[in-house]
Image: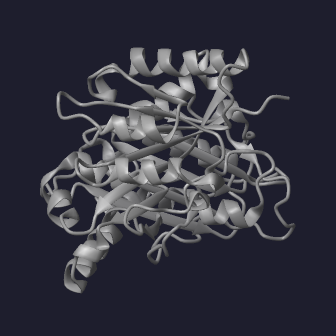
Amino acid sequence: MTHPIPVTLLTGFLGAGKTTILNHLLHDPSAGRVAVVVNEFGEAGLDHDLIEEAAEDVVLMPAGCICCTIRGDLTRTLISLLARRTRGELPFDRVVIEATGLADPGPIHHTLLVDRVLAPNFALDGIVTAVDAVLGTSTLQRHEEAQTQVAMADRIVLTKCDLADNATIKALAARLDQLNPGARRITANKGAVPSGELFGIGALRRSIEPDHALNWLAAPAPAADPLAGLSGMTLPKKDPILDLAAPSHHASDDRIATASITIDEPIPAQVFDFWLDTLISLRGPDILRMKGIVHIEDVPKPFVFHGVQHIFEPPVPLESWPDGNLTSRVVVIARDISKADLEESLSVLHMRPKQGDDAGGLSEHSLPTP
């Protein structure tokens, strides 16, 4: 069986230092054979001359924002790379896509997952976001694009820390805690980051080890759940899901919230499907990212699941999960939904069907599909 080629998406707002990270990565022998897709934005594009000197296996996309041209240029570029690899002209083991400073990672994830040619051959391994330690706090305060990039990250690389004082770095850390407390943070050494910190991040593969899956999930400690132990499918007076139909109102710099939950007992499939399907149907466009390790009743092993907005990757069973550990963990990062509303929505997963109800079963088809 041929395994999909792992794809790392390198994001970060304008001036965050993505190109410097990429150039160091291409000079790192431990990175292996990497094909790079870079993107220019307008006339003030990437310093692609440096990148071309660092490696021959580089594809420069035409000028234009990767978000705007993704359905065309990115797809054609990756298909061309794949064809050259198949013919033996361009051997590589992975792809790094450097997005523009204004790019939303969501459409790139969608394209890799739903395109009929790309989906069987490429798989998103992780989203790495560069953040300028000097200007990061003010950038996140002013630009929604930067907030989204941080919120969706698996890894956050802090750049220019040698130019920032302790108070500035401390303020930035507090802001990152608000947007994405679960993403691992790495400090770049003048742009250099070990390739091992950026590759092999994803957990959606059958050979994944339990410790890796838990590190990938990196769920922050959940708040005390007022509905723990609730039995029956009757919702409380304040409906924790249907209440989400109306967007919450936030200040412009506080639109993104993260919530998580842990559940000690296996979840009935009926409950999980009800929660997920309803949340996605009501607020799918506002779900920046959702991931979890879920134990379903009468299913011997837990599943890893991951989605962006309404697009979900097929769930993967954790075959090596130890017997006796039945705790489920779910993390949701959303825009324009308050943390309190997210936590109330997650509380539905504590519910249990009334005796005699058919709980059904969990399969790939019970999750939203492209």
User: Is residue 119 positioned above or below 9 on the image?
Assistant: above
Question: Does residue 253 appear in the picture of this structure?
Answer: yes
User: Is residue 28 positioned above or below 65 on the image?
Assistant: below
Would you say 346 lies left or right of 214 here?
left
Would you say 158 lies left or right of 55 here?
left
Q: Which residue is at the front of the view, 317 or 195?
A: 195
Q: Which residue is at the front of the view, 2 or 348?
A: 2
Q: Quadrant of residue 157?
A: bottom left
What residue is at 44 percent from the left and 48 percent from the top? 22
Would you say 26 lies left or right of 143 here?
right
- Residue 171 x, y percent position in the rendering: 22, 77
- Residue 253 x, y percent position in the rendering: 16, 58
Q: Which residue is at the front of the view, 259 or 352?
A: 259
Q: Quadrant of the C terminus?
A: top right
What residue is at 53 percent from the left and 51 percent from the top? 27
Residue lying furthest front: 53
Q: Quadrant of the N terminus?
A: top right
What residue is at 22 percent from the left and 47 percent from the top? 14
Question: Does residue 240 appear in the picture of this structure?
Answer: no
- Residue 316 x, y percent position in the rendering: 73, 44
Residue lying furthest bottom: 166
